[in-house]
Image: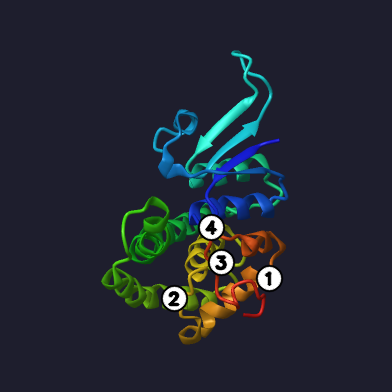
Amino acid sequence: MRKLYHFSICPFSRKVRLALAEKMQEVELVLERFWDRRPEFLSQNPLAQVPVLVDKVPKDATGSNEFTIADSNAICEYLDDQYPERPLMGETPRAKAEVRRLVGWFEGKLYSDVTVPILSEKIFKRLTRQGSPEPLRIRQAHDAIHFHMEYIGWLSEQRNWLAGDAFSIADIAAAAQLSSLDYFGDVPWEHHPAAKEWYARIKSRPSFRPLLTDRVGGMSPPSYYANLDF
């Protein structure tokens, strides 16, 4: 069976898990403490980043029947090519371009503005014993998230899904970021009803439910975290 090296609260790992589940593909999950920089893991991805997918394929000239892919975008595009029956990247050039644009936004600006400071301060400092959280950095992230929530809400009101008529990896990428933040109670749903309604639709999909059972670093999520209706 294929393996996915992941870390449960990592939004990029969550994105690939959701894509695999939407494609109805089984995978063995291997929890990877990537900051430990295990030599075996570094041999699969010298950047020491998750996720990494090790797929089973026909043997090549060297006799290997494994194909290793690092980077969540590369993995998701590979899965979409391998299993085209449930397309997630868009079906036309324009649709594909819009999906990629939004993925770039969520995994670039939303990630750097909000996800990085929240996860760094609230969980990774604890796991790597790098000191106490910096309240100012967390407050700045809390201020920044409103802009992104407004954008997600606006997109969801203009379209059926974020990138257009069809559910896509753009929805998955945004939901993966927000679900990681929501674990720590850092998404102001009460101020953004349109984004909340969109997220509730994502949250109710069968592919999403395993993520809601994850627990990280001995920390429990808010009581509403796993509720499909908040």
Decide which of tag 1 and tag 2 comes sooner along the chain. Answer: 2
**Quarter location, residue 197:** bottom right
Decide which of tag 2 and tag 3 comes sooner along the chain. Answer: 2
**Residue ID for mark 3:** 164
**Residue ID for mark 2:** 149
**Residue ID for mark 4:** 95
Residue 5 location (% of width, % of height)? 56, 42
Residue type at the position of mark 1: Ser
Residue 115 location (% of width, % of height)? 40, 63
Q: Residues within 10 Å of mark 4 (few under 14, many from 20)?
A: some
**Residue ID for mark 1:** 204
Residue 51 location (% of width, % of height)? 51, 44
Instruction: Single out the mark in the foreground, 4 or 2.
Output: 2
Depth check, front residue: 165 or 175: 175
Decide which of tag 3 and tag 4 comes sooner along the chain. Answer: 4
Instruction: Single out the mark in the foreground, 2 or 3.
Output: 2
Q: Residue at x 46, y 57 (%)?
A: 103
Left or right of 99? Residue 54 is: right
Q: Residues within 10 Å of mark 2 (few under 14, many from 20)?
A: many
